[in-house]
Each structure stands twice: as C-alpha cells, then as structure tokens.
Amino acid sequence: MSTPFAPFEPGPSSNAKRRGRRIRRFQRVPLKMILPNLVTLLALCSGLTAIRMALEARWDLAIGAIVLAAVLDAIDGRVARLLRSTSRFGAELDSLADFVNFGVAPAIILYTWILNDLKSLGWITVLVFAISAALRLARFNVALDDHDKPAWQANFFTGTPAPAGALSVLLPVYLHQLGILERWSEIEPVIVGYTFLVAFLMVSRLPTFSGKRVAMRVRKDLVLPVFVAAVLLVALGVSYPFEVLSVASIAYLASIPLACRVWRKHVLADEEKARTQDLAEAQPSSDGGAEPE
C-alpha cells in the first residue's frame, strides 16, 4: 500500500558540504598540466636575468639569457601540445613572458649598450620596439581564434614573431662583440634605423616562415645524421656564439622576401582554384535545363 507522503530523507549536513568543498579545493592537478607552465616560468626567469646582466654591462651573459629564453619558449608550446595540456592560463602566461623576454629585455640591452648616449631619441627607439612587440603578441593571440583559413597558412606567421624580432634586433650587438663595429658610436643613426625596421617587421602584415609544423617524426635512415647535425649546431653555438647569431639573424631577414614569394604562390593557387569552381558551377547542365516529363 502506497503512502501519500514520501519518507523523509535528510540531505547532506553542513559538515558534509564543508568536507566536499575541502576535497574539491585540494584536488590533485596532473603533472602534465603543470610542466609547460614551469618551462614558461623558466623562460621568464631567463628574460629577467638578461635585464640584470644588461644593467651590469655583461653583454655576453645578457644575450645568452635571451637565447635561452627563446629556446624555452619554443619548447613550452610543443610540450603542451605533446602532453595535450594546452590551457587558456598557459597561453596568457606565455604572452606575458614573451613580452618581458622579447620586448622589454632586448630594449633594455640596446638602451644600456649604446642608445642611452642619444638621450630621448634612444629611449623613443627602444620604446617603439617594446610597444611593437606587445602589439605583435596581442595580434597573435587574437589570430588564435580565427580557424576559418586555409591549412597552408599554418606554415606562416603574420609579421616577424617576437623571439625572432628580439634576436634579430640585437644584430649590432653581435657585430660589436665580434669587433666588426668597434667604432659603433659613429653609426648610432644606423642602429636607430635598424631598430625601427625590426619593429616595423613585427607589426607588419608580411608573411614569415613558421617552424611550428616541422615534422615531429624522423625517418630511420636520418636519425643518426640528425643527431650529428644537432651536436654540431650546439657545438658551434657554444664555441662561436656571436658568429652563429649573426649568420642566423642575417639569414632570417633574408628569408622574409622568399616567404612573401611562397605566400603569393599559395594565394594565386587558391584564387585559381576558386575561379575554376565558379566556372564549373556556372556551366549549364547537360540536359539543357529542360524539365523532366
């Protein structure tokens, strides 16, 4: 026989609710979610160390810290994608670290190295570079939400990325460390113009090559050559750091016209494909458009 009223079932007590909140508060976070952010924080520490080295006029260590920050910046994103631990928090932290590492730190290195002799003009120069880096990073973050674009565009950046801009803008410092610009005080206007050029490349719409889609798998017959090439590159970088950085910066700047040319070929191919599809859709059907009986 059914009863007109359901039996009384007491809900969870206030103590149980508090225990549930404490359990949720102390839930464990997987290590794979933390590791990419730790790499980003290490890159930030390296960028801040570069600022300290610049203030102490230890240019070789300052540049080395910028290079280390660039290497760690290239690693953290790949680690996050490999571990499938990308997050909005990690993306925001990466952008803030990139602004310090590749916007503020190179600007301070340039200013303390030579541009402080130009007083206000030198400060305006490094200010424009740092602001350009911030604008470049903001535009990159907005572009992440744009998924309606051809697949081939993933092989390109819009403008010079912040790490490449930071390493390229320090080219005069590399040349000075090599003794090529011993009388650098006489070419201060050239250094100012070069800094403005790199800042313009960062905020421009010029396409540049991206290495984010480099194959993560290596053919078996190429494994040993890849090992040898990696060891050779590291050895050259350690033994001849400023020579390698100078050649890499010049080669990167020289690759921008080539990237524009390849981009243009892709655009023309897409336009030709779109015209072909439009012509195919505009052609009348084989039955002449007659209605069936």
Image (spheres, rainbow, N blue to C red):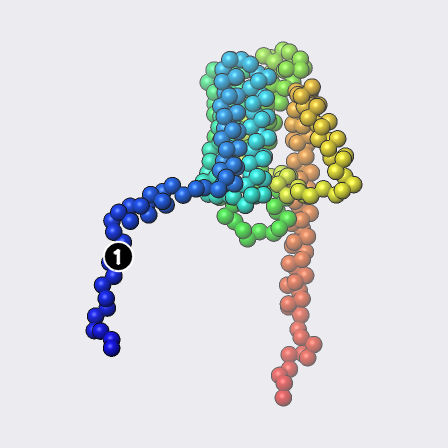
| Placement of the N terminus among the 4 image quadrants | bottom left
Mark 1, residue position:
11
Residue 286, relative to residue 133: is it above or below? below
* Left or right: 225, with 281 as reference point: right
Quadrant of residue 273 within the rendered picture: bottom right
Q: Nearer the viewer, residue 275 or 57?
A: 57
Q: Nearer the viewer, residue 285 or 91?
A: 91
Q: Is residue 231 visible?
A: yes
Location of residue 47 in the rendering, given as x and y in whole percent from the top left corner? 51, 25
| Placement of the C terminus among the 4 image quadrants | bottom right
Residue 266, relative to residue 126: is it above or below? below
* Left or right: 55, with 266 as reference point: left
Residue 78, relative to residue 46: is it above or below? below
Location of residue 26 in the rendering, given as x and y in whole percent from the top left corner? 38, 41
- Pick out the residue farthest to the bottom: 293
Residue drawn where x is 61% and y is 46% of the image: 154
Location of residue 114 in the rendering, given as x and y in whole percent from the top left corner? 54, 15
Q: Is residue 205 visible?
A: no
Residue drawn where x is 64% and y is 67% of the image: 281
Q: Nearer the viewer, residue 280 or 242?
A: 242
Q: Could you tell me the amino acid type at mark 1?
A: Gly
Quadrant of residue 202 within the rendered picture: top right
* Left or right: 69, with 96 as reference point: right
Residue drawn where x is 68% and y is 56% of the image: 272
* Left or right: 51, with 266 as reference point: left
